[in-house]
Amino acid sequence: MTLAQQSQLRKDYMANVPKWRYPFIGYLVTIPVTVLVVLCTIYVAKMFGQFFFPSTFCVISILFVALFWGAGPAIWSILLNSAALYYFFIYPTIGYDITNWRDALQLLPFIGSGLIIALITAQRERARFQAMGAELELQSYARELEESNRQLEDANKMKDRFLSIASHELKTPVTTIRGQAQLMLRRISKQKKTSDLDGVATTLERINDQTGRLTILIDELLDVSSMRAGKVVLNKRLCNLTSLCQDVVDDHRMLSERRIIYEAPSEPVCIKVDVDRLAQVMTNLISNALKYSPDNSTVEVKLQPEPTHVLISVQDRGKGIAKDQQEHIFETFYRTPDAQSSTKRGLGLGLAITKDIVERHGGRIWCESEPDHGSTFLVELPFSG
Ligand code: ADP
């Protein structure tokens, strides 16, 4: 600790001490206390004829002063009490002979015990002072930590704002490019086919595919930024979950040309949900199941109504997810090492968005998986949500 810090600490310490305990008050108080002690000692001596321990009251007074005003006033009290003891009890017994200084040495044990009291008091003060120093240092660290936290929060907010603005700005041109490419594709398909136009059509299809992918990524980024800003609003209405899931499964069957088994009760399962958002949940889970499993494997989607909730499961026969990674896959931007090293592209946002939507419906989502035995994603949606 620097000298400036120590003096500041002393000031802070004094500011916390009540005024009546300031040392100069202690020096003043010591005088009447010593007078009182001498009077009491004389009184007791007179009462019993002889007082064998005249220094008893003096030690008590030193203790009293030390306790409330500290080491300095305690030493001042030792001096005053020694002088009083000498003047009132030793001086008369040596016939008022000031040259007989040897008898004054009898005061030494009393002075010694007084000094021990002062020493203990000084140590106590030092310990209290050090504890206060440590506390102040801790407070200053806490303030620094609070400040860095605030800065981090600001940086995080700025990042979210950037994410939101950038995705908004990207969406318009990408949608336009995609629209134009689709328009051109439609026009070309109406024209008489020539080999020249075939090449243009292939290029346009590629533009269409890539901008389609870009649109999905931008939508995911937009969803995450509204999710973080708490701007997601659900538009709930009663819907038949069986047919909603059926539609999503059919779309994926058509687009991927993969085998997707769908098991659901024949009668409608009606529940109040945001239809678009729930379709998004199913799309994310089924497209992940297709993406992270071999092309020739099957994906199974099941819908099971229970008394209080509906259980939806999406099972694949892929590589599976290790136990320690399962707790992270619902975090934003998390991708398993397997996914990162594979050719499967993604930002690691789909499951975070899915989890947010499910939880906003009062439900829960989890994953059950064994490496090399595929993964099952389960969604539980309460009827009362
Ligand atoms: P991504 O865009 O990377 O697919 P998601 O949020 O949808 O992002 O998924 C997060 C990560 O969870 C994926 O990168 C992948 O590592 C893992 N994952 C998700 N679904 C499956 C699945 N069915 N099988 C294996 N791993 C999966």
Image (tube, helix red, strand yellow):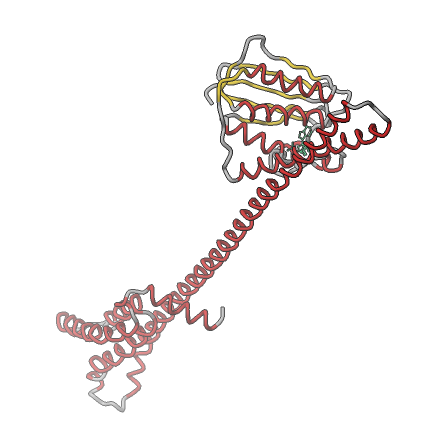
Q: Image quarter for residue 294? A: top right
Residue placed at 47% from the left, 60% from the top?
Answer: 140
User: Residue 83: horizontal and vertical position, in percent?
Assistant: 25, 81
Name the residue nearer the viewer: 201 or 148: 201
Quadrant in the rendering for residue 171: top right
Estimate the x, y position of residue 327 in percent, counting from the top left: 61, 34
**For residue 38, side relative to residue 3 (left or right):** left
Image height of 233 relative to 382, above or below: below
Q: How many marks?
A: 0
Drawn side of residue 75 relative to residue 97, left or right: right
Which quarter is ligand 1 in?
A: top right
Name the foreground residue: 14 vs 181.
181
Question: For residue 115, which quarter of the picture?
Answer: bottom left
Residue 283, percent from left and from top:
63, 25
The residue sitting at the right extreme is 195
Quick one: 36 or 10, which is closer to the camera?
10
Picture residue at 54% right of the left edge, 22% below the top: 275
Q: Hey, which residue is sitting farthest left in the picture?
A: 47
| Up/down of 139 relative to 118, above or below | above
Classify residue 174 as left or right of residue 201.
left
